[in-house]
Image (cartoon, rainbow, N blue to C red):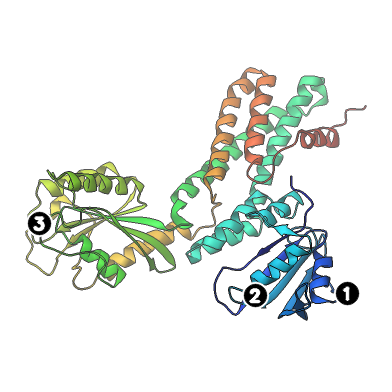
Amino acid sequence: MFDDATIVAIATANGIGSISIVRISGPKAHEIASKISQKNAFQPRLATLSYLYDTNKNLIDEALVLYFKAPFSFTGEDVIEFQCHGGFAIANMIVDEVLKQGARLANPGEFSKRAFFNNKIDLTKAEAIAKIIEARSEDAVKLLARQLKGELTTFVNDIREDLLFMLAYTEVSIDYAEDDLPSDIFEQIKSKMEKIIVKLTNTLDASKRREGMIEGFKVAIIGKPNVGKSSLLNKLLNYDRAIISDIAGTTRDTIEESVKIGTHIIKIVDTAGIRNASDVIEKIGIEKSIQAINEADIVIALFDNSKICDDEDKKIIELIDENSHKEIIKVLNKSDLENYFDKSNIKDFIELSTKEDISPLIKKVENILDSNTHSDEMTLISKRQISSVENTLYNIDLSKTPLNSGELEFFAHYISEALEHISAITRPYENDQMLDVMFGEFCLGK
């Protein structure tokens, strides 16, 4: 829980700008605003232009004052926002005056925490708020906006209702005569279980495919030395980020940069050339290259059209075969030079020259990203949400055996566990909810 103190914080990013916003929340918010502005009252949801003064009656600034009366505010408490002129000094001066009037500095995330405890938002919206502030792509913003609107909350509530139904009827069947229950109740329970499993499994799969949407999908460029990996990185970035040399092993570490392709922000990782190296530092770089492949959402494997397919190329082919579950784009580079590479060693490749036009590769990457993002599938946005769904599925799976064998106490235990895990995504489950279903839907007093 939280205390009933009035809290204050600067709600805009630190730096120079046209405006800064100072936000106050708590029982003394209106009183403090009245003292600083020397106005008796503010009309809720109406912007009032007002002078702001310090305790010595010195003018601080002329600002817009907005009053949100409880419970019709973000936190559910009285909230005041001062929209003052931007800069490093003015907002801090206002905060200092608010502190002198009895408020305290807000802790990180405390406004959202109060909104949660006052039932203004649930955990899905709180997480979406935190993520949308950091979002770096249009796709991430669109996804997070859906969660802010309550899409995941509705999804979770539907699952909760089905699990509550199953748990409530099971508890009743344990405590009351079976002839008080619908004859097909266990068939209904099994049907609901299978539907839940399908929904949650599809959600998990979609979420893992789109895991990189929030922070940026990771694209690893791999290949043996001197196939043009660094040239491709520089071409994608449109400036010389990586050193280019004919000397094998020039790139000895992974280089990571971000670039926008279509509506997507991607992290491009240029890896060290993969080969049998004797140099200790280069060996470490190659190990990091293999790690980058494991972490990547998309792997671009480069081969040199002007050289024969050798053992080092075959090592790259082995690596991409081992990672066939990933999106792999095979590129035959240096197509402007005479062909010596045996094309039968790779299939479904793109031919290009990193010195000329790489648009076919960019289009291919964009199509892959579009297919992973432009979907109406429910998507989880945090490891906490994913873990909750995995644990829910695990307990539902465990519940199947006792249900089939008629051990209803064990079945009820696993369904209760599943209910707690799925509820953790939005708001913790309370046992009274199950009792409400039991006594609200069953005629037990006859």
Residue under the image location 12 percent in, 70 percent down:
336
Residue tagged 2: 90
392 in relation to 262, above or below = above
**Position of the C terminus by quadrant:** top right
Q: Could you say where residue 347 lies in the image, as x and y percent from the top left?
A: 21, 53
Q: Nearer the viewer, residue 291 or 52?
A: 52
The reply to whether callout 1 and callout 2 are in contact (CB within 8 Å) is: no
Residue tagged 1: 40
Quadrant position of residue 240: bottom left
Q: Give the Cα separation between the discs numbered 1 and 3.
A: 82 Å
Mark 3 element type: loop
The reply to whether callout 3 and callout 2 are in contact (CB within 8 Å) is: no
In this rendering, the label closer to the viewer, 3 or 2: 2
Residue reaching furthest to the front: 56
Q: Earlier in the sequence, mark 1 or mark 2?
A: 1
46 in relation to 320, above or below = below
- For label 2, count other residues whose C-alpha is less than 10 Å away and answer few (under 14), some (14-19) or many (20+): some
Q: Earlier in the sequence, mark 3 or mark 2?
A: 2
Mark 2 element type: helix
Residue under the image location 76 percent in, 31 percent down:
168
In this rendering, the label closer to the viewer, 1 or 3: 1
Q: Could you say where residue 94 lies in the image, as x and y percent from the top left?
A: 70, 71
Q: Give the Cα separation between the discs numbered 3 and 2.
A: 66 Å
- For label 3, count other residues whose C-alpha is less than 10 Å away and answer few (under 14), some (14-19) or many (20+): some
Q: Amino acid at mark 3?
A: Phe
In the rendered structure, find residue 341 and report the number of the disc placed on it. 3
Mark 1 element type: loop
Q: Could you say where residue 88 lies in the image, as x and y percent from the top left?
A: 58, 73
Residue reaching furthest to the right: 446
Q: Amino acid at mark 1?
A: Asn
Q: Is residue 78 left or right of residue 360?
A: right
Q: Is residue 352 left or right of residue 69?
A: left
